[in-house]
Image (cartoon, rainbow, N blue to C red):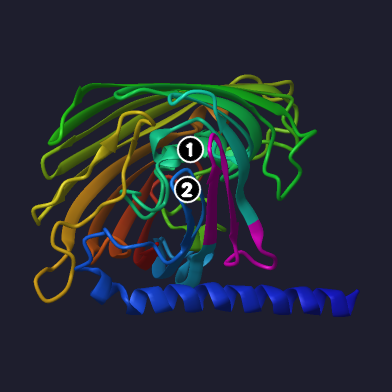
Amino acid sequence: MRSTSVAAATLTETVRYAISLLAGACMSASAALAEDTGSGPDPLRFGSGDRYVMFAPFVQFEIGHADADPDDFLDGIDDTRVQYRRARLYTDFKFDRFGGEFTFDLATDPDPTVVYGYLNYAVTDELTLQVGQQKALFSLQDLTSARPALFNEDSQSSALQPGGYLGVATVGATALYGARNWSVSAGVFGTDVNVEPFGQGTSVMGRATYGPVLTDDAAVHLGLSLVGTFDPEPALSFAGDPGLDLFSDVSTISTGDFTAVESYEAANLELAASVGRFTLESEYTLATLDDREKGSPFLHGAYVGLLAFLTDDHRTYDGSTGTFDKVEPKAPAGPDGFGALEVGGRLDYLDLSDAGPDAGTEIAGTGILNWYLTEKLRVSLSHTYTAVMDGPDDGADFNASLLRFWFTY
């Protein structure tokens, strides 16, 4: 058994190194690619037209620092941590109307994890059926992939959304319909395939979006998502955090465990816009659960974020999926360009106080600077201040700073 585990660990490190090496080679070549018009062949795409296989490495490396006040809050956290946040290899494929994706991440310890693994079939140009490990159909910030993510981390209200308790992606079957400026999707889900996809409850969820304004220079997005989770196992719990995945082991406020949950229901309202150099993203999540021992608390949270490009750039929007697209700088970094520079801020609110005296309420503020050197390279610097407003640690606060380097093929 020991030799098997050692061999598996060696294989993991080898593949992780290979992905990092591949990403590093692409990063080294990015300056030359910056002036590429995009008309040339993709070296990691094999096939043509509607029959192809495409590989895309994705690496995030980050360093963060956090401290708390008072000093004894959260065990006196004053720490600097470094990690490979992601070391993924995306594999997309298509054969006429059939397609799918398989993605695994080597940055997870101790073993690699399957992030996505699904097949789909395009019934029509608008309607697609999809089955396998995929994103849950809930929340603009969750469905916007990591590549075009506006902020380094999701908002505090994401703790109430399916991604917070089912996993980043879940096993399920979905139907997705997307037109030019609206979309409708619905699905049935289990839980993360890396844990136990079945036998831990069933979630039914759906999302609808509409873009009342959709031009080359402006887009307005409205969205509504609903989810019902029935007989979840194991226990459910909801918590706030300092705003950094690096310190995910720290909870600023928490409901504790609900061990006798019969159902969990949540709704999410979305309002977003991209107008010229400005981007607005906001959501409000409200949730309740039925626990045989602790009753039916009402939990809710919200955020609003506003960003602006300092360069002549614009964030585009895809009305058929109700999500933002990846940023492509008009003048990539190189002899004739600087890339795209974006600044922004976000306010968060999370209220878990109805879950009992040991829970609480908190607010948070995040400032961020995004520098998109090229379509593939990005550097982000952010700082988050979190303050507990109610609960056992009322009056405590937390500061967390993060520097992240992105390579997104």
Please give the range of residues in magenta. Answer: 89-113
x and y, in percent, of residue 70 in the image = 41, 61
Q: Is residue 244 left or right of residue 189?
A: left
| Image quadrant assignment for residue 264 | top right
Residue 401: horizontal and vertical position, in percent?
34, 64
* Label 1 secondary element: loop
Marking on residue 204: none
> Which secondary structure, mark 2?
loop
Judging depth in this view, the residue of 321 and 170 nearest the camera is: 321
**In the image, farthest residue toward the right:** 1
| Looking at the image, residue 100 lies above or below residue 30 | above
Q: Which residue is mark 1?
A: 360
| Residue type for callout 1 | Gly
Q: Which residue is drawn at the image coordinates 79% and 78% (left, top)?
A: 7
Image quarter where the C terminus lies is: bottom left
Q: Is residue 407 magenta?
A: no
Residue type (three-letter) at the residue carrying disc 2: Asp
Q: State the residue position of label 2.
A: 393
For residue 83, say whether it is visible.
yes
In the picture, residue 320 is in which quadrant? top left
First reached walking from the N terminus: tag 1 or tag 2: 1
Mark 1 crowdedness (10 Å alpha carbons): few <14, some 14-19, many ≥20: many
> Which residue is painted at 20% across and 50% down in the image?
344
Q: Is residue 197 left or right of residue 13?
A: right
| x, y percent for residue 150 | 31, 48
User: Are the residues at dot 1 and dot 2 in contact (C-beta closer than 8 Å)?
Assistant: yes
Query: What's the distance in space between the residues labelled 1 and 2, CA to CA?
Result: 8 Å
